[in-house]
Amino acid sequence: MKRSAPNRRAFLKTAAFAGAGIPLLKILERAVLADSTTQPMNFIGIYHPHGVSAEYWAMKATDTETVFDIAYANCSLQPFDDAVTYGKSFKNKILVIEGLNHLSNANGHDSAGTILTGSTIVPGGTTQPQNKSLDQFLAVDQMLGASTPVTSIALGVGNDSTASGTTLSFGPGGVGLPKIIDPSAAFQTLFGNFATQSNPAAQAAAAHKQKVGQSVLDFVTGEIGVLRPKLGSIEQQKLDQHLTSLRDIEKQLQGGGMVSCMAPSAPDATQFPKLKQYNGGEPYFDAITNAHVDLLAQAIACGITRFATLFMADLSYAGNPLMLPADNHGGVAHTYNGSSVGQNQHPNTPGDPTTWVPLAELNRYSYSKVARLMQKLDALGALDNTLIYVSSDMGNPALHSTQNTPTVLAGGAGGKFRMGRRLKMPLDCPPPANPWCQPTDSTWTGLTNNHLLVSIAQAFGANINTFGTQTDPKNTTGPLANLT
Amino acid sequence: MSLLGIASTYGASFTPDAQQDGFTNNDAQRVDPVFAQQVDTAAQALAAQARMNVATLAPCTTTDPTAGEACARTFLATFAAKAYRRPADAREVSALIAVYHAGADGFTYADGIEALIRAVLESPGFLYVTEIGDGSGAPSATLTAYETASELAYLITGGPPDATLTAAAAANQLATGDQRAAQARRLLALPSASARVTSVVEQWLGIETISDTAKDTTLYPKFAGLLGSIKQEADDFVAQVFAGSAGGLKDLLSADWTVTADPNLAAAYGAAAPGPGTTRVSLTALPRRGILNQAAFLSVYSRAQETAPVLRGVAVMRRIACIDVAAPTTLNINIVPPVPDPTKTTRQRFDIHQTDPVCAGCHKNIDSFGFAFENFDAMGMIRSQENNLPIDSSTTVAVGADFDGAYPDSASLLTKMAQSSSVASCFARHMLKFAVARSDATTVEQGFMPKWQALAPAAQGSFGEILVAWIASDGFVQRRFMP
């Protein structure tokens, strides 16, 4: 005797009634609905500076989509497979995508604005993208951030500018949104009103919520126990799977859920007496980044917000812990002399291997912060429901190239994307085309990151098939293949 | 039926259903961790919303938790029965009352009702459709009246039983084939049944993915603008073809008309726009017949830049004719598609299949179907030339079927296939697979196909009549216990 779950749409039909609602109720409903769509999925966009040392980032000849080595010497992706430092390997929680392009139609440094907007950058006075960024589209337009205390948050390190090249989050029309660069301010924004610890009434409410949640789980578990003996072994397996799923929820309820939602203590402001780039803030960037990362993890896990961006900085000061030249920009990024793999596959370019290592080291530093974020989210039970999109404005920084940008997806992505893989997009100018062909040429077959933005939006339930602003609509239309 | 009187689109955000044989109605569904979390979240939000209407949903003269228990029991008597599609038994009620107290004690009556609603929405009684019978564990069992009602309702409308069906279950009036057939016919007339048949037929043909299909915008600039109308055309056409108990399959495959309210789509087809007050468009003057000549099917089974004769051919063989086609992966063949060549037509490029004996083994048959569609481009518009060369859509089908023969194009081939008894039986087997919701339906199929053979010829191609025949049969309510 089979016993089958009705399909998911059937749940909708059973629980729902498509009655004539008055507009106010509909708005309310949609906001509450947002809770259900986003509870499983949080989004964090992260920028790191200075492109990538492709030689220590790209797939090796021996790598396959699912079997690959990122622990070899100098590999910048090492932090994702470093159980000693981060408690476990997150290799199965990343999806590295090679060969996406940021078609900004602008100087590489202004192209950060393209990462989450998929828009060309309008040059001149404003120098900004033409549409809002993905985090804002999801949090505001789709109302997925409506039910959390903080709709979305944009954090930055060292630079509170809102110009295209300095931020990821843009509002309607592509207007840059303010970033918070002070972790103390970020704490106030995220946890200022979150006074569970000191407020007895809020504490009692939280305890009640946990008690009810546990009671419901006990009830459902008990009902399954009554049903199970009446079924054949195959059907029993289905119920066992259901029980396993319930234990996951219970774990969150008892461990992650409540414990993590005690407000963290405020960051120690003495760790970063100065905040701003070019104003003595550089030596504190590492501490600022860590504080931001830790706050983000707490806020996401507590459901304070579900949409965040973090704009990281380099460590341009003498005596930096990476022992890189004091000017990371001029001394590391601009001196990078890539081989063919780092030169958009242009032929006959051996490059200079000695220049690959310092940039790889800077990249590894950037990824170490992503790994730290993953570690914290994981400890709070929120990593599996989070999608982190990490990229830089450029691919090859010495060329200021916006081709072959280093795209890394991290987290469990709510099961929407198949993680633990490496993907290679088609070449921009495959033979026999001129390897220097341009996006406007007919031989150009490169893919824009707009497709990834469409995929992410769809993963969050948005019913769209295009994202961003490009001259040729084919560059904005359709999801990226092979993610789901 | 409404459980809570709340408009909701929760289901739409759930993770996609597992598919078997292309159908989402199947026994592979699981409450996996992601789905469980989504259900938990949706149940909490719905319960919190329902709480705002507690005075209407579960009225009570007291807010005192202890005194409120009686009101909670009254509420449960109707609410749990609706949610479980059967009355809750005493043990279930008492387990739910424990949840009520967890919510209410120390707080209020409304808190208890909120907890109750959440528990019911997460319970197996709500989430699963059971097929247990009386639970005696005998080697075979007959579904209970309430189980039969659920089975019927989910099959035909995709939702829970309505009040009439529930009343029939309560009065034990679903035990005979005639009783079930009468209820089935009643349900088939509902709008939800029409939406269901559209969805099932589109899953069968694989065209439900049309909404996720994109074309190269330089080659097919009109596609994105027409996409909505293309999807609507398929939906409306299927709904009209299978309305009531008409012999839908023949029209589905060979109708010389289609349905669209969009004059741009009609114009793209080369047809006259529909007249006032109608959405029906005549195709008599065009080489375009039935669903497989509509833009939805032709676009789904194409690439972004060009047609895909192999995809089209395989779809017709597997889905329409039930002719087995081995997958290249199982044959351990490395596929090397012919490279684009501006001096040849797609058909000329794919003709390499004929010259390579390894390819020809399968592709002789596949291409004989696929090439017949070559007079339609990658978004299903009629073309007479490709790369300035004339299009050839003529074909000779020789697969040992009752539609073997030479045809100038797919429209004439499909007109012939629409009359074929093997195509009709293929349709019936696909619909039965959907109805039984199992991939391994061989035994059930062997029992059912003679009953289908006995139907009148027109009924053999009717979605509704096939379902009614299945629902009236003993197989619909009988289950073998699989230890």
Image (tube, rainbow, N blue to C red):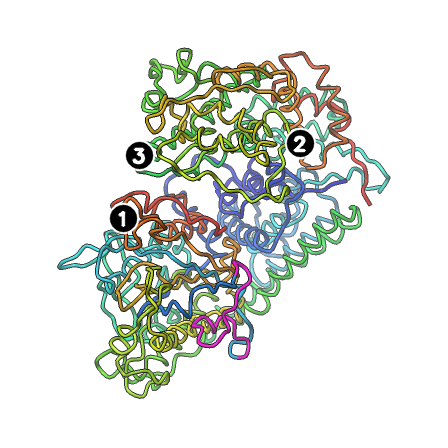
Q: CA distance from mark 2 to mark 3?
A: 39 Å
Q: Is residue A407 above or below residue B334?
A: below
Depth check, mark 2 against mark 3: the one in front is 3
- In the rendered image, residue A367, in percent from the top left (x then y), is placed at 42, 71
| Chain at numbered mark 2 | B
Q: Is residue A420 above or below residue B382?
A: below
Residue interval drawn in magenta: A64-84
Q: Residue at x 30, y 37 (%)?
A: B218
Q: From the viewer's perspective, is A9 left or right of B210?
A: right
Q: Are marks 2 and 1 in contact (CB under 8 Å)?
A: no
Query: Per the image, is A451 magenta?
Result: no
- In the rendered image, residue A380, in percent from the top left (x then y), is placed at 52, 69
Q: CA distance from mark 2 to mark 1?
A: 45 Å
- In the rendered image, residue B300, in percent from the top left (x then y), is placed at 46, 34
| Chain at numbered mark 3 | B
Q: Determine which residue is flagged by label 1.
A: A469
Query: Per the image, is A67 magenta?
Result: yes
Residue density around tag 1, few if under 14, some if 14–19, many if 20 or more, within 10 Å = many
The image quadrant of residue B200 is top right
Quarter that holds the N terminus of chain B: top right
Q: Is residue A285 above or below residue A124?
A: below
